[in-house]
Amino acid sequence: MSDYLTKEGIKKLREELDRLIAEKAEINKEIEDARSQGDLKENAGYQYAKEKQNMLLNRISEIEERIKSSNIIDELEINKEEIRIGATVKLLDLTGKKEVVYKLVSTNEANPSQGLISVSTPIAQGILGLKKGEKKKITLPSGIIKEFEVLSIDY
């Protein structure tokens, strides 16, 4: 399954991968130290280090697979006049009379407190495909209806 990530998202994954690979070397040393202490069946340090190593290897594998199967949004051919994944949009919330700024990202990159919203959220789904100046009413899961006007679209 292909995933879509921004350049920042792929960069963060690579940084995490580098950190985990460095951590893996430390865990390998812990395992060797614990192994040198003798009986492995009753060696809690060895058992703990092996569990930690397995979790680490699983996460490394997950990240490597995700990087390999991801498409970088910034490199896709998209109509930059419309709101698509990867766009940073400034909206006027006509209901609350305030401006909001969102960047539409993949579900894995979403962090609403930083303005990064998943393209699968109701607001993102409602504004996808809109152009500057267009307005749209969106019904949120809570039943609240919001109306937005697109002020700007940047990639």
Image: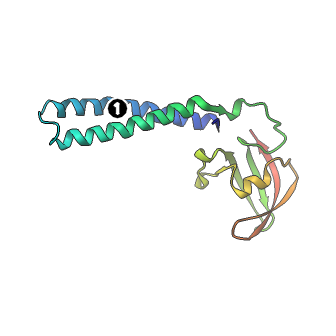
Q: Residues within 10 Å of mark 1 (few under 14, many from 20)?
A: some
How many numbered tags mark residues here?
1
**Which of these two is toward me, 131 or 63?**
63
In the rendered view, would you say 140 is above or below 118? below
Residue lying farthest to the front in this orientation = 41
**Which of these two is toward me, 9 or 89?**
9
In the picture, measured across the screen, residue 70 lies left or right of residue 57, that is right
Q: Work out which quarter of the rendered image holds the C terminus and state it.
A: top right
Label 1 is placed on what type of residue?
Answer: Lys
Q: Work out which quarter of the rendered image holds the N terminus and state it.
A: top right
In the picture, measured across the screen, residue 67 lies left or right of residue 50, that is right
Q: Secondary structure at mark 1?
A: helix
Question: Residue 85, position in %: x, y?
Answer: 72, 42
Question: Residue 82, position in %: x, y?
Answer: 83, 43
Question: Residue 70, position in %: x, y?
Answer: 62, 33
Q: Quadrant of residue 93?
A: bottom right
Question: Residue 56, position in %: x, y?
Answer: 38, 37
Q: Residue at x 69, y 70 (%)?
A: 142
**Which of these two is toward me, 38 or 88?**
38
Q: Quadrant of residue 97?
A: bottom right
In the picture, measured across the screen, residue 116 lies left or right of residue 54, that is right
Disc 1 target residue: 24
Q: How is the image coloured?
A: rainbow
In the rendered view, would you say 93 is above or below 38? below
Q: Residue at x 31, y 41 (%)?
A: 51
Q: Residue at x 32, y 40 (%)?
A: 52
Q: Residue at x 35, y 34 (%)?
A: 23
